[in-house]
Each structure stands twice: as structure tokens, then as C-alpha cells.
Image (cartoon, rainbow, N blue to C red):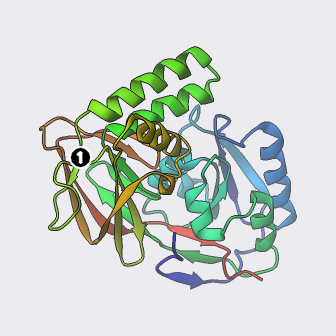
Amino acid sequence: MTQNDSSNAGSRLDAGPTVWLVCNAASGSNDDASVAQVVEALGEAGFPVDRTIRFPDEEAPTPAVLDAAQVDLLVVFGGDGTTHSVVSAASGWSGAVLVLPGGTMNMLPKRLHGDFPAVEIVARLATSTLETTRPTVIASRHGTGLTGVLAGPGTIWNEVREAMRAASIVDFVTTAREAIAWSTNGPKVCCAEADCGREEGYSAITVTPDTDGLEANGYYAESLADYAGQGIALLNRDFRDGPHDSLGKHARLKLVCPDGEPMGLLIDGEPFDGAAEEEFYLATCEVDLVTTRNAS
């Protein structure tokens, strides 16, 4: 992804800031030891953690909750799905959110900080002013997508990924077979804009927020081997590895299932109930996110 739309260089938070940390033990690299390292790093950087929230057992804090506790900085250490929930819940808050990589793909932290580990990102806060940004995001009737949308029968590969995460070999084999079949035979999805790819549709269309529009790509397959290969790419959420068509950039994008069936839909890796038609818009994040790309 590209650098964010707008950044604001601000002063360090006042001495003794109130810091809350949200973490998720189910995320890819989010065990007790890694959480302890992040807490220690935050303390050393001058941002000692006042409260740790274990999501999803505890709810993501809303602006009202954060303001009542006079929180200055909300830190989220989890995967893309956890980050989606926490940033969405904090939407409209006047404080700042620090997003750290604690999952598998960590798409938003890479956009805000580059591809660096959490403790290294935190260490930058001790030597620089706190800079925030409000990046472009994807708006829809389902809420905000911070990193991307995946639509079409290819979304079934999310179930395979969950089976792998649960370390269930039987479930993995079963869901992988079902995913190949459904990717082949499930209702395809089309981009409704003019000159926007194949009329017959795709097994999956990805939508990614960029500074100048929503970037769309259509993923297809011509053989079982292609489907299997694409499935592995989808499983790893590295969609660029799959065979695809570039569908351009759009300020507004409508996706349609020609069969009139509800389309599979993932937003930031989390499943949503898609309809036969879905619209997406380029928007701006409604809370300040800390960025360290310009930190020394």
C-alpha cells in the first residue's frame, strides 16, 4: 500500500499520558510473552500501560468509555480483524490510536509504519514527536474497511484459514476440498463499472484503499490447478500471487453477483453477509492513527 493521505506532526503527549492496550490472544503473534514485550517497550518509551483489554472477551472501548477514563493513547496489538474492530469502535474519538503488528498479515501497521516488529515501532516513539494521520479507507453499508475487501466465492478460503489456525487436519482437508469446489461452481461476482473486467465475473474481487481511489483486482482460474494455486494465495491473503485482472481505481465501486445470489464478503479478513449488490466508497478514517514512517 502507499503512504497515507494526510499526516499531522504534533507534540509529544503531556507527561504521564493515560495509555490503554487492546490485545487478542487468538491473533497470529499475540501470546503472553509478546504482549509483555510490548508493555515493556511502551513503558520504556514513556507510555506506560494503565489498562490491558483482552479482546474479544472484553469489548473494544468506545469514545465515551475512553473519554470517561481520560485516555490519551489507545494501543491495539492484534491482527487485521482485531484492528478493524478496535478502530471502528473508537471512530469519532479525539485521542490517538497506535496500531501495532500482532497478527499474520498486519496490513494496516505496514501502511502506517513499514514492515517492522512492534517493539521497534514503539521505540521510535521515545525519540520523536507523535505524528498522526487519517488514511483513506473503504466505506460501505457494513462499516469501514481499513485494509481491504474480498468479495465472491473465493471468500470460502477464509474457512480453510480458520481450520488451519485451529490446527484441525480433518477440518482443513474437508474445507480445502469444499473451497476448491465452491470457488469453481459458486456464484461469481462482477465489477459493475464500465470496462471493468470479465462480464462473466470472477471467483474473487479485492478492493484496496489507496490515496487516489479504490484499487480493484479480479481473480479467476481456468483449471483446478489454478483454483488450488489461487486458494493458497487467498489462504495466505497474498492476493497478488493469484492470476488476476486489474480492474482500475474508483472513487465509488459497485460489485454485483449476476446470479442474484448473496455474494461472499470479507472486510479486513472478517466475514459479513453480502447481498447480490454491494457498493464501496473511498473515505477517510474517522480517528487519528499514529504513524512512525517519518520518525528518526
Residue 109: image location, x then y, percent? 61, 62
How far across and how far down the image is residue 248, in percent? Answer: 30, 70
Residue lying furthest top: 170
Residue at screen point 60% across, 69% down: 112
At a point 23% along the width and 62% down the height, the residue shown is: 253
Count of numbered badges drawn on the protein: 1
In-front residue for pair 127/184? 184
Q: Residue at x 55, y 45 (%)?
A: 82
Residue 242 vs 138, above or below: the answer is: above
Between 202 and 243, the residue placed more toward the observer is 243
Determine which quarter of the picture holds residue 111: bottom right
User: Who is closer to the viewer here, 163 or 112?
Assistant: 163
Tell me where residue 226 sits by quadrant.
top left
Q: In the image, is 145 to the left or to the right of 37?
A: left
Instruction: Report crowding for label 1: few under 14, some 14 to 19, many 20 or more residues within 10 A (C-alpha).
Output: many
Q: Which percent across, then down, holds residue 142?
A: 30, 48
In which quadrant of the rendered image does the C terminus lie? Answer: bottom right
* Image location of residue 50, percent across then percent down: 74, 52
Relative to 162, residue 120 above or below: below
Q: What is the secondary structure assignment of the residue under circle 1?
A: loop
The amino acid type of the residue labelled 1 equals: Val
The residue singled out by tag 1 in the image is 189
